Image (cartoon, coloured by chain):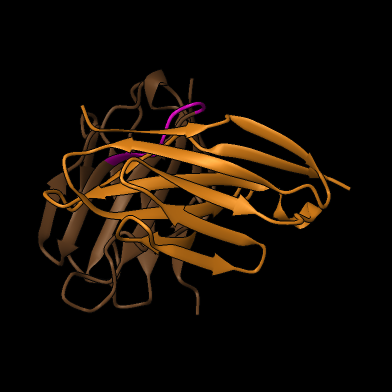
Chain colours: A brown, B orange
Amino acid sequence: NAGVTQTPKFQVLKTGQSMTLQCAQDMNHEYMSWYRQDPGMGLRLIHYSVGAGITDQGEVPNGYNVSRSTTEDFPLRLLSAAPSQTSVYFCASSYGSGTGYSAGELFFGEGSRLTVL
Amino acid sequence: EDQVTQSPEALRLQEGESSSLNCSYTVSGLRGLFWYRQDPGKGPEFLFTLYSAGEEKEKERLKATLTKKESFLHITAPKPEDSATYLCAVQEDSNYQLIWGAGTKLIIKP
């Protein structure tokens, strides 16, 4: 099984450019999410989705957009990149509530390392 | 404010030297506490879920315990391959989302 696949693994952008980080999972998970990880800080939730067509904001949503047109895919769009968005981005998924699995048992991708100059 | 604090930030041990990592939390009500392992350049990998005070979970050289205010990850006779950053996260009973600690970087020297 591939699990959670993120692309690209590395990306360098200039301030003001836009891009999309891709995330796909093959486990038929209802719940998908995007986190950013910065040195010395805990993972911070950007956006999440509890199913196709349903998305919501997390702790740090400004400057990012998401959509969920299929169960498998959950892309993250950076609208106009800023140096403060330099970070490592993780996509994570889990089974939904009511399945007997805890929503806290997340499956993570390997991360996308973004540098904004 | 709800928060999760992990200590120490970093811990260096000799191979075979047992120790514990701490995760303290302040939330109004606990739905679950989760431990993850993260290797350099990789995403976090789920280890344990704890739901109530007094609960314990074990996996190989790792044992996680939970009280009303904190959780401990005990590592017994560690090996160099146990070197990683260990993350703790808490889920409130009123909120679906996780609150994450900053992690403890564990280094086991042969």
Residue sitting nearer the eye, A23 or A46: A46
- Residue drawn at 89 percent across, 48 percent down: B110
Looking at the image, the residue that sits furthest to the right is: B110
Measured as percent of width and height from the top left, residue A8 is found at 49, 50
Q: How many marks?
A: 0
Residue B50's place in the image compared with A13, above or below, is below
Please state if B59 lies on the left or on the right of A49 as rendered.
Answer: right
- Where on the picture, by quarter, is residue B77? bottom right
Give whichever of B48, B85 is nearer the camera: B48
Q: Residue at x 31, y 59 (%)?
A: A104
Q: What residue appears at the point 33 percent right and 40 percent down from the top-left corner? A: B69
Residue B40 percent location from the top left of the image: 64, 45
The answer to whether any part of residue A96 appears in the image is: yes
Q: Is residue A113 magenta?
A: no
Q: Main secondary structure of the magenta part?
A: loop
- Report whether A104 appears left or right of B31: right
Q: Is-magenta flag for residue A43?
A: yes
Does residue B43 show up? no
x and y percentages locating residue B23 in the rendered image = 45, 40
Residue range of the region highlighted in magenta in the rendering: A39-45
Residue B6, x across and y down, in percent: 47, 34
Figure check: A1 above or below A67: below
Q: Is residue B50 above or below residue A70?
A: above
Tell me which residue sits at (33%, 63%) in the image. Answer: A93
Q: Nearer the viewer, residue B30 or A45?
A: B30
Q: Is residue B8 above or below residue A22?
A: above
